[in-house]
Structure formats: structure tokens, C-alpha cells
Amino acid sequence: MSASRIEELQESAPQTRSFSLGDLIRRRPETITFMLLVAICVIVTAINPGFLQPSTLIDIGRASVVMGLFALGVFIILAAGGIDVSFTAIAAFTMYSLTVLVLNHFPAMPIAGILVAAILGGTLLGVINGLLVHHLKVPSLIVTIGTQYLFRGFLLSFIGTVWIMSLPPQMGAFGRMPLFQFEAANGAVVTLPFYFLILPIAALVTWWILNRTLMGRAIFAVGGNANIASRLGYNLRTVQIFLFGYAGALAGLAGIIHVCANRQANPFDLVGTEINVIAAVVLGGARITGGTGTVLGTLLGVLLIVVINSVLVMVGIPSTWQRLVVGIFILLAAAFFVTRQRKK
């Protein structure tokens, strides 16, 4: 066979693209989050082997539920190019008003009915956000800053400011209901609560919506370019209402779980936790500009924030330093994603 023929065959042969870690990180930015999470766990375990004991892991899982539900709602809005900061106000409004309603008027309401009512209440407040965003034609950040103050103001002015320490029995029982429990080496009983299952269920539903439905395609299309999405036939009003309604439903559910887990209803709760939640979603690989991100990345971001806070508490670092560390992680993530975009 001639040399020229060999060269022709080599040129016509399919070229195999070499795989590298950089390619994986560019395609799946949540890989960085996972690597950071593993690195932190390895370092802390080397310093304090008790970190990975079952009781600590269960505490981390328990602390991830409410933040995880919030983060899934924030992520689905970020994927469409928006941002929501009113979810804690929706949660507080729903959890407190529903607790007052059950105590005063429906003391025998089953916990399933309370959970459904929380979801419906959160959905209603979320739909208000969606309608305002669509019809006012202003950035969702501005709208949700306004509704955050509106919902909290209405709650404190017309519903109540009293700290409810005695919950309806069915709510307290739900907060204590064990998924499984065991006795630790020191004799303490460690319990993973039943409500933990709500987070993986919500994550699966969110994944299914984003990856297996036309609404999921519409969300990412709007996040990529809303004008082009509209020309392709996507109804922006429907997408906006669904987005904020779904995020509101998750916020309402997170709020009532927060009450049941803490066995008290405080209308001033959850103020200031918005930054941690948004940080978790951004660290999970979602861009503020929209069109990207995954449910898995969001959950990894939540775990990263919870683990960081847990580690800092274990070593006695004050809460002000916790905010500093989270801020550094956000800046590093932003720098990484900008660099990744430039390379593309």
C-alpha cells in the first residue's frame, strides 16, 4: 500500500477526542462542587475523625431539608433567567398563618391536609409574583424584593407577631416522626426524621419537570433568550406563572416543615437566609443569567453550604466568619464560571 493511500485512510478515519478533567468540569460545573465537598470532608475527618460519625451525617441531612426545598425553587427560576428573594417571606407567611388557622379553627386537620394547604398557600403567593413579573415587565429581583416586604408586612400587621410555642399535636408529631433511629455510642438516640424524604421526592419531581416535560424545555429556552423563546412559540406568561408558583409551593412546604421540625412558629423566622440559599444554587453550577444548571448540582451546593456551616460551628468559628467563608466560595465560583465561559 502506498504512503499516499495510508495518509488518505488516516485522514478519513474517525478522530477520537481525548477526554480531560477540564472538559468534564466545563460540561458539568457541579463537578467542582463535588470535589470541594469531598476535599472539605476529607480534611475535617483527618483533623476530627468524629466528623463522619452517623449522628453528624444525620444532622447534616436534617439541616439540608428546608434549605434544599428553597434552593430547588430558586434554581428553577434561575434556570429561566430570573431571581427570587421573596421565598423566605412566602414560607414565613404560609407557616405562621396556617399554624394560627389550625390552632383556632381546624384543630383536627390531619397533617396531610396541613401539608397540602401549605403547598397551595405558597403556590398562590408565588403566582402573585409571576403575574407581577410578567405584567410589570421589570426584573424579577425588583418585584420579589417588593413582595418580600409586602408579604412580611401583611403577616406582621394583620396576622400576628406572637411566638407560638404550643403547636397543634399533629404538627409536633410529624416533626418527631422517625424514618429510622439508633442509639449512638454515648447512649444518645439519633433520629433521621420522616420529613427528610420530602427533599429527595421534591428533587425528583423538579428533575422530571426540567428534563422530561415541555415546560422544562420552555424554562431553559426562556433562560437562554426570552425573545427567541417567545418567537419559537413558548408562552412567557404561562412560564412565569408556573416558575414562581412552583417555587412558592416549595417555599410553603419548606415553611411548614420548618415549624414542625422546630416545634414552634415564629413569624420573624428565616429572615436573612436568602443569601445562603442563592449561594448554594450558584455554587451548584447555575448561572444568574439563566439557561444552565442541574438539580444534582443544586443539591451538592446545598450540602456544601450546610457542611461548611457545620464544620465552622464544630471548630468554634463565629457566625460572622461563616458569612465570610461563604462569600469567598461565591467569589471563587463566579471567577471559575467566568473563566469557563471565556474558554468556550
Image: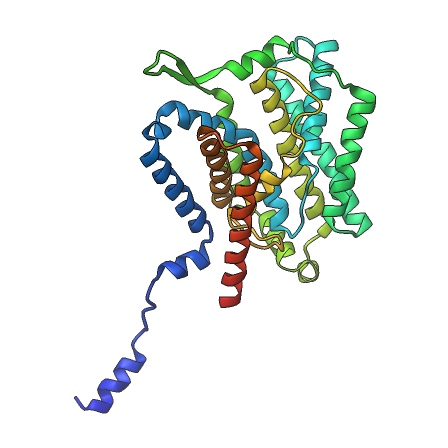
Give coordinates of residue 305: x percent, y percent.
Answer: 51, 38
Query: Is residue 232 visible in this depiction of the protein?
Result: yes
In the depicted structure, whether residue 278 falls above or below residue 151: below
Render colour scheme: rainbow
In the depicted structure, whether residue 290 falls above or below residue 273: below
Give coordinates of residue 16: x percent, y percent.
Answer: 31, 69
- Front residue of this view, candidates 69 and 284: 284
Residue in view at x 55 percent, y 54 percent: 334
Query: Is residue 344 visible in this depiction of the protein?
Result: no
Q: Say whether residue 302 is left or right of residue 169.
A: left
- Front residue of this view, candidates 199 and 62: 62
- Front residue of this view, candidates 157 and 248: 157
Q: Say whether residue 291 is left or right of residue 194.
A: right
Give coordinates of residue 215: x percent, y percent.
Answer: 61, 47
Q: Quadrant of the N terminus?
A: bottom left
Give coordinates of residue 286: x percent, y percent.
Answer: 55, 50
Residue in view at x 68 percent, y 58 percent: 226
Quadrant in the picture for residue 184: top left
Residue in view at x 64 percent, y 19 percent: 114
Q: Say whether residue 200 is left or right of residue 38.
A: right
